[in-house]
Amino acid sequence: MALQVYGIPNCGTCKKALSWLDNNQITYDFIDTKTAPPTRDMIADWVEALTARPMRNTSGQVYRALGEEKKDWSDQQWIDAFAENAMLLKRPLFVKDGKAVMVGFRAKEADLQATLND
C-alpha cells in the first residue's frame, strides 16, 4: 500500500512535505481533507497510533475558536472534534500501510527517510 498524505493543497507545510517526498522519489497519494474528510473510524485509528495531542492544529483559527475546556479534553473528545471539522487536524498527516506514522513536517531528514520510505 502506498503512503497516504492527508492535508490541504494550499497549506505551506503540506507543500514542503510533498516537495520533499517528490525530491526523494517516495510515492504517495495526497488526500485533500477539505474535499475528502477522513472518517471518524480513520481518525480514531490515527489517535490510537499517535494520540490526539500531536494531531491538534493549534495554530488554526478553528482551534483558537474552541473554548478553554479544550485543554482538558480526552482523546475521545478530540476524535469527535477532528471528525466534525478536519481543519482541527495538524497537517500533513502521514499514513503508511493503513497506520498513522507521523503528523507535521519538522523531523530530521534521516528520521523522515526511515519513517516514510517505501
Image (cartoon, helix red, strand yellow):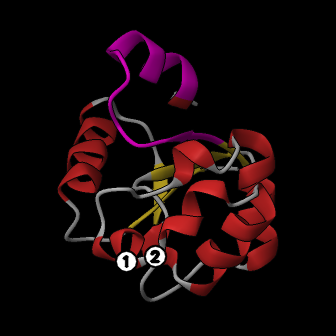
Is residue 32 visible in this depiction of the protein? no
The relative height of residue 77 versus residue 101 in the rendered view (above or below) is: below
Residue 46: say if magenta.
no
User: Looking at this rendering, what residue extends furthest in the top direction?
Assistant: 110
Secondary structure beneath dot 2 equals loop
The relative height of residue 112 versus residue 49 in the rendered view (above or below) is: above
Number of the label disc, if any, that sits on residue 66? 2
Residue at screen point 41% across, 10% down: 110
Residue 113: say if magenta.
yes
> Percent x, y for residue 76?
80, 64
Number of the label disc, if any, that sits on residue 62? 1
Circle 2: residue type: Leu
> Percent x, y for residue 21?
34, 39
The residue nearer to you, when weighing 69 against 8, is 69
- Tally of numbered tags: 2
The residue stretch that appears in magenta = 101-115
Residue at screen point 73% across, 69% down: 77
Q: Quadrant of residue 37?
A: bottom right
Residue at screen point 35% across, 37% down: 105
Question: Do residues under tags 1 and 2 come within 8 Å of each other at their CB atoms?
Answer: yes
Secondary structure beneath dot 1 equals helix
Is residue 11 visible in this depiction of the protein? yes
Number of the label disc, if any, that sits on residue 113? none
For label 2, the crowd category at 10 Å Cα-Cα, with few meaning under 14, some 14 to 19 and many 20 or more, is few
The residue nearer to you, when weighing 33 against 83, is 83
Mark 1 or 2, closer to the camera: 2
